[in-house]
Amino acid sequence: METFATKAAYYRLGLKLSTHTIAEVIAWADAEIDLQADSPIDLLELAVMQNARPLDVASQLGRMCGRVSPLEVVTAVLARAHELLTAHPSFGPTLARGIYQLYAEYSDEIPNDLSSMCSFEGLYALARAEIYGTVEALDRELLEFTAQFQDARNFSAES
């Protein structure tokens, strides 16, 4: 079962990778408040941040996720990304940028089976410059890459 801190880390990474919106984070916070008799102040503050910047909301979530690393929830977020890519293939470059930023921050900790995810940002740049490949082909590759995480969608942060 996922902990409150794990759920906060999930939504924080979701904001950073653009797989979740502030509205979805606020809806989760509201649901958590309904479940908890004595909600922590950080959660109450999060619930009223609907007009805040994404970085501010991510920072607030960071105070709530304790020592939970983004790498502990990355597969669940990539499962969500797969759903978004299936519906909107043009989401690929945005996701690739977020993945690269995650990789840059945690490169020493990224497991080998996830290390290939860092290449998509550079490949999109090459495709846009018409040097190598096409954006459409990369959209398909990124969709295939994220498909391996569909089982992680069972993560219950959104329930």
Image (cartoon, rainbow, N blue to C red):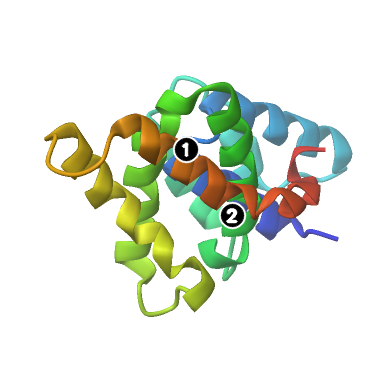
Q: Is residue 150 left or right of residue 21?
A: right
Question: Is 103 situated above or below 154?
Answer: below
Label 2 belongs to which residue? 9
* Residue 121 image position (x, y, % from top left): 28, 48
Q: Which residue is at 79% across, 32% downward?
A: 31
Label 1 belongs to which residue? 140
Q: Is residue 5 left or right of residue 129?
A: right
Along the viewing direction, whichever of 149 and 75 lies nearer the viewer: 149
What is the number of the mark on residue 46?
A: none
Q: Amino acid at mark 1?
A: Arg
Q: Which residue is at 64% across, 46% downward?
A: 79
**SS for callout 1:** helix
Q: Which residue is at 37% across, 40% downward?
A: 138
Along the viewing direction, whichever of 134 and 128 lies nearer the viewer: 134
Q: Is residue 113 visible?
A: yes
Rate crowding at label 2 as few (under 14), some (14 to 19) or many (20 or more) other CA atoms within 10 Å: many
* Residue 119 image position (x, y, % from top left): 31, 57
Question: Is 109 situated above or below 104?
Answer: below
Q: Is residue 118 left or right of residue 149?
A: left
Quarter of the picture holding the C terminus: top right
